[in-house]
Amino acid sequence: MRSAMPTEETQRAGRFARLVSEFNLRPDRYVDPSWPAGIWPAPWNDIARFGERGRRVLANALLAAVDVPVDDSGGMRCEFEFAAREGRLALLPREPLLELAELCGLCLHKAWLKSEVTRGVEKALLAEFGAQTLAFVRERTPLFDAVSETLEPVQRYPKLVVQKIRARGGRILLDFAATAGRPVLARMRLKLPRIADVQPAYRLNDAQRDELAELLYLCLIPERLQAWDWLF
């Protein structure tokens, strides 16, 4: 007797379970390289050069460094409850999460980006984010004015402009996901560049959270991260 083909719902459940499992058990697969580089001296700051066992040991040390709570057995506490969409952001693999952080950073500065930025800044933005992404943010995203940032004071330094956009975008995602709890937030911190973690917190109020949720779930994810829309 031929076994029944898995339904779309079953396939999604399997993908979700794998994401949760890797998130809890395999931080070595998603730690951003800036974390070990910013904490340990060479050659210990390059996780990729070690074998699987060594990568796990170093990743677990990083979990301790970001204050993942410890359970009753002394191990790093895991989280398996992801009913809230805020927590599901942390389950995104590192690359799409980084892309989402970049988009958030650009949207934070949308009003400034639509003004007359310098030629050097525009060239740097095009090189780092691409013409398609810049056009999308400038023309197709809603004005995110609940939290609005400017980069006018640093526009003489195009590389710093790009760095600030990425850092602030990652920071606001971390602040948004903070309601998911410490075990989730700590692991999510490791997925994003360390510079986002040291940015000043936005301390979002309810109105700001609601506006950011609309931007994320009704615009950025469906339009730019279509492959991950099912997760939310």
Image (cartoon, grey):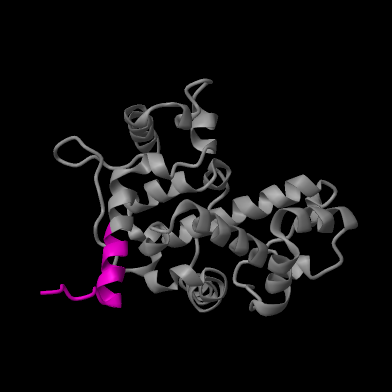
Q: Position of residue 171 (x, y in %)?
A: 54, 53
Give left or right: position of 152 versus 176. Answer: right
Could you tell me which residue is drawn at 66 percent across and 76 percent down?
Answer: 143
Seen in the picture, residue 71 relative to 9 is either above or below; the reply is above
Task: State the image quarter where residue 55 is shown.
Answer: top left
Q: Position of residue 153 (x, y in %)?
A: 80, 52
Seen in the picture, residue 45 relative to 28 is either above or below; the reply is above
Is residue 232 visible in the rendered structure shown here? no
Where is the C terminus found, in terms of image quarters?
A: bottom left
Furthest-right residue in this view: 119
Seen in the picture, residue 70 relative to 225 is either above or below; the reply is above
Within the magenta stretch, is there residue 60? no
Within the magenta stretch, is there residue 6? yes
Could you tell me which residue is drawn at 48 percent across and 68 percent down?
Answer: 205
Give left or right: position of 50 versus 150. Answer: left
- Bounds of the magenta segment: 1-17
Give left or right: position of 26 versus 118. Answer: left
Is residue 79 visible in the rendered structure shown here? yes
Residue in front for this viewpoint, 191 or 114: 191
Seen in the picture, residue 135 relative to 197 is either above or below; the reply is below
Q: Position of residue 8 (x, y in %)?
A: 30, 76
Task: State the image quarter where residue 108 is shown.
Answer: bottom right
Could you tell me which residue is drawn at 26 percent across and 53 percent down?
Answer: 79
Q: Position of residue 5 (x, y in %)?
A: 23, 75
Give left or right: position of 23 versus 228. Answer: left
Furthest-front residue in this view: 1
